[in-house]
Structures are given as structure tokens and as C-alpha cells.
Amino acid sequence: MPETKDLRRRITIDPITRLEGHGKIEVFLNEHGSVERAFFQVPELRGFEKFAQGRPAEEMPQITSRICGVCPTAHHMASTKALDGLYRVTPPPAARKIRELFYSAFVTEDHALHVYFLGGPDFIVGPKAPAAERNVLGVIAKVGVEVGQKVIGMRRKLREIMTAIGGKAVHPVLGLPGGVAKHITPSEQEKIKQIAKEAVDFGSFTLETFNKLVLQNTEYVDLIRSDAFTHRTYYMGMVDEANLVNFYDGPVRVVTPEGKEWKKFAAEKYLDYIAEHVEPWSYVKFAYLKPLGWKGFTEGSESSVYCVAPLARLNTAQGMATPLAQEAYQQYFAALGGKPVHHTLANHWARVVELLYAAERLKELAEDPEITDSQIRTLPTEAPREGVGVVEAPRGTLIHHYQTDEKGIIQKANMIVATQNNAARIAMSVEKAAKGLISDGNVSEGILNMVEMAFRAYDPCHGCATHSLPGSMPLLVRVHDHRGDVQATLRRDWDGSIRRS
Amino acid sequence: MTPQIRILCLGNEILADDAFGLAAADELRRRFPDMEVVFTTEAGFHLIDYLSDADLLVVVDSIQTTNVPPGTLLVFRNADIKSPLGPSPHYVGLFETLQLARKLLLPVPEEVIILAVEAVDCMTLGGEMHAAVKSAVGPVVELVQEIARCWKLTDAEHDGNPAHDLEHALAAVSARCGADRFAVI
């Protein structure tokens, strides 16, 4: 295969084609009309460092929760933990538990919505179903209105928990450096316990439903296992001291494509392990494992590409910390042929296992006698300097890093969102899909669907913060012949229509 | 009976042109203190919390079609939109959420009007709103006022067709703000 150097002569980064809000795929064909390379870029949030500079770090948990309109709590929590580090202050046990309880409610809700409504079109309705059915309505048609209402009901109750603890479910007033803003009263605890119990039942019900509707659909299971959606990369996720999955706190663990521990590091050390590579054809940065150096978009043990999110977390950990989830974890690996699982579409299944864990953990914390303790804050006494906060957002490892002056005004800031960690693997998935679908220079509309399915499994949060209608990101696929000239352009527009030129 | 109208403004105040919704909400609240105006930074499926218990929902948001000049106000009725499947579950948007809410038998209004400004940049944190987008705040407020007025007309003045109400509202506002400010989908 010709060196990338050749292609670079033909690739021009045209600033005019940096279409705002569009995902863009550039496909380069060789003389035979097959895909030589495919490059994928999505719009990325810009200007975080500049935006943060000059702001009081203490405001960041409130401000950064606005970065994402879908998972504000993840940013709020990562930011809060960065403040703990900044002021070198450790929250008292009750505060830590309150934060984790809130966070568990958040993950339960987010995963529930995702499993039923968001990822559901792909795996509950199925990839071979007509496009008109592969949406949330198709999901309801399959699971029934009653189940849909159950999900909404569960969401409402989980939000009641979040409102009780944080004042409001969205943009909660919760995290402070060294603690939380409010303690939990005994009567609130009772209410939370009741909802948590329902959440666990709901988690079990979801696992059952998933088994029935999805795992018995052999066509879909074959797709999960197919090579087109399989990549052998490293995996990263947060674990507790026993190497079990934890969303809120703990060291970050990375395993090799063979599933062996490669490194385990504390949040503050992330820069020793994660670096970002910029390709000339993209303004998106691709995270990779720094000690290994950038090895390109490759997989296997020679790669330095890694992956985050449910699939990765289950691969990285050695189990789940709660009983029902642990059972589900074991079934998952048994069915998919052992650890690690490299099938991207298994993310949906892994998410169901995590949903159960989040609900069980919520219940555990709700029943903990210390949760109503009044010691909820350790006041900072040291001058701030630098802090890193890491959490597992539902879509993967999220990092906030602030450096301040002695007054706590941010001088430098960095943020790695979950999807940046997955960017390289997503690019590989898209290229693999393109290679599988384009031959003899024929570009079918099917490519849009299959490519989208590959990257829907990652649930990328590029540009998730924007509310721009319709919520769906238009996608542009440009095919270049072996001379680099544009041969065809397919564009899925904001209203779903496909235009070809 | 007076119809209950809710103006739902969507946006993100820290994301450049995505702050349009907030600018519109602020101006609407200033001019029409009795109107039910809601602003939220929530996105995706979470919009479900704002869709119930109104007779008419007017949504104000940004959009990037790249088909019209920045600052153009696109106007459409939910009845006319077929919801596309997004490239990411993260991107489940207003249309799918509306459809889902109806399917789940939530009391979502029959009539939903969407007013979306063609934005330039919704990706720069802390970025300023582009002048063209900012200039659409006035017209969108005018249009909301006109829509609300048309909807409050007595039965004798209604012909029962909501599309006509919207047409009347648009005609009235186009005369004041210029017809090329609006694009009806």
C-alpha cells in the first residue's frame, strides 16, 4: 500500500469545506476503484482553554456543566474533582458518598435512556429493518408503549433524587471543592432507597428484555461478531481498588488488546499516558497512548490506539462490584467468547450490564448509614495550583485539568471528552466500513447507513453541546478517485434527505 | 377558552450562535411578561420535560442547514417534518422526542411551530454571536408575538386551519421585517 506521503500531496485542507456542524468523510480510491484510505472528521468543540482562562476555577463546575446538554452531570463532577485536586483537599466520606450516589442516579438514567431510546433503533429494531422503522418509534413498536412509559417513569424518579440532592437535576448545585453543598436528610434517604430499589428491578427487567429482544435475534448477534465492526485496540476505564468498574473515582486502568493490564495510573498522571495526535487532514485531535508513541490508525499490540465507554470498561475491569451486575458481566463474556471483547456493537450490551451496576450501586449508597452524616465539607486551606478531575462519563473517560494562579484564576486548562479518547478507533471503524462497502468505485447510499451504525455504537459526543436542530448531524461523504479528483459526493442533510452529486 | 401557548427557547449561552435561544428568551420576557417563556440548555431526549401541557408550542432554536444565509429564520410546523435517524444517539433531537412523547401518550400539543435561525458557529466555547444571527432576535420576537396574537383570535376569526394562522402571522411580520428574513420549510 502506497505511503501516506503520496496521499498528502493530493489532500488539501480546504478551510471553506470545514462545514460547520457536518461530519465529513473523505474517501480516497486507488486505480482499481477500491478504498485506499478513508478519513473521518466531526466538528469538535473549540476554544476550551481560551474560554477557561481568566475565570475563577470555583465557577467551573457550574459553567462546564453547560458544555453538554445531554450529560451535564459528568462535566460538573469531573470539574468538581479537579477543584479537590486544585485545593489539595479531600472530601469527607459522606460527601464522597453523596457525590457518588448522585452520579449513580445520573448514569442509571442516562444508560436507561440510551438502551431503550437512543441505541435501541440499532439493536432493538435491528440494522436490517427499513430506515423508516429504525428510530425511537420503531423501538416503541417493538417493546410496547407500556415499557416506554416505564422508562419515562424511571427517569422522572431518578431526577427526583437528583433534585433532592442537588437542587435541580440539570446544572445541580452540588459539587464544591472538598465536598458537597447539602447533606441528605433521613426522610430524603428513605425516598432515595425506595427509588433505588425500583431502579434495580428496572435494571433486571432491562437485562431480561435485552436477552429476549436482542440476543435471540441471531442476525444481530452475527453482526455484533462480524469483522466489519471489530477492532483490536487497547481499552481504558476507571476502576476501584479491587479493579472493578467505578464511574465516580479510582485509578484509570488500561489493558492491552490481549486483555492484560498495561498501566494503571492516578488522575493527576494522565499526561504521562495520554497524548493527542493531529493528522494533517483533520482538525480533530486523536488521543493515543503516549509511552507507545503514535503508530497510526492500526490495531493489535503494535497499536497505541485505545477505546473508552461501556465496552472498554468491562474489558478493563476484572468484574463488577455488585452481585446482579457481576452475574450479567459473566454471562456477557461467556456469550462473546471471553475477555476482551473487541466488537464495537457490543457496547450496547455492555451498557445494559453497567445500567444494572449503576442501579445496584445507587441502592448500596442509599442504604449506607453514613449517607446522612452532616460532615459534608472539608474547607480548602491551601492556595490553589493545579488539579485534575477524572470521571467515567456514560460515554467514557472524561478529564478536566486546571492550572491557576494563587487566587484560583485559571491560567491554563485542558479537557479531554470521552469521544476524543475514541476518535482514532472511530476513524478506523469508518475506514473499515468504507473499505467493505465501496468497490469498483461504486458508492452506494448503503454506505451512509453502515458507516453511521459503526459510529452510532460509540455514541460520539462531538458537538453534542449544540442544540442546533434537528439534533442530527448532517454527514458528507466525498469520494476521490486515484488522482484525487472528487468523483462523487453523498450528503445526508439535516432533514434526513440524501443528496448525491 | 384562551389557548395556552408556551415558547420554548433552546440554546447554550456559552456556545456562540447557540446562545440565540437565550437572547430570544430574554427579549420575549422583557416585552411580554405574561407570556410563558421557557429557556433550557438541555438537549436531546431531555426536552421531553418541556413538551407537555400546552395547546401550542413555539420552539426557538438555531440550525445549520448551510442552505440559506446566516440569520435567516426558518419556519416550520412539526406536522411537516419527518424525523431522520441521527448519526449518533447523542443527537436525538426535538423531532424524535416529540414523536416519542406522542407515542407514549404524553399530553403534547398537536401544533408545534419551530423557528430556527441559520447559525454560523455553534462550536466555539465562549464565542460571540455572529451579527447576522443576533439581528434575527428582533424578527423572531415579532413573529412570536404575531403567532400568539393569531392563536388568540376568536373562533369566528379562525378557520380551524393552523397553517393559515401561521401564514397570516408570517405575512404580517414579513411586511415589517422583510420577506427574505424568513424561509418557510
Image (cartoon, coloured by chain):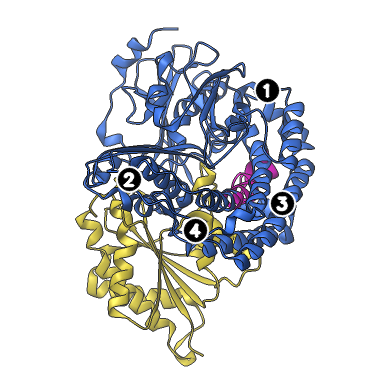
Chain colours: A blue, B yellow
Q: CA distance from mark 2 to mark 3?
A: 38 Å
Query: Are the residues tagged 4 and 1 within 8 Å (C-beta)?
Result: no
Chain containing mark 4: B
Same chain shared by disc 4 and disc 1: no
Mark 3–mark 1 CB contact (< 8 Å): no
The amino acid beneath tag 4 is Leu
**Residue carrying label 2:** B123
Label 3, label 4: how many angstroms apart (C-alpha)? 29 Å
The answer to whether the residues at label 2 and label 1 have Cβ atoms under 8 Å apart is: no
Query: Cα distance, mark 4 to mark 1?
Result: 39 Å
Spatial CA distance of label 4 from label 2 is 19 Å
**Mark sitting on residue A200:** 3
Is disc 1 surrounded by few (<14), some (14 to 19) or many (20+) residues within 10 Å?
some
Q: Nearer the viewer, residue A126 or A58?
A: A58
Secondary element under disc 4, as helix, strand or loop, is helix
Residue A94: percent from the left, percent from the top? Answer: 54, 52
Q: Nearer the viewer, mark 4 or mark 2?
A: 2
Total numbered badges shown on the rendered structure? 4
Residue linked to disc 4: B94
Q: Quadrant of residue A237?
A: top right
Viewer-proximal residue among A447 and A50: A50
Q: Which residue is mark 1?
A: A339
**Label 3 or label 1, whichever comes before in sequence order:** 3
> Is residue A118 magenta-colored?
yes
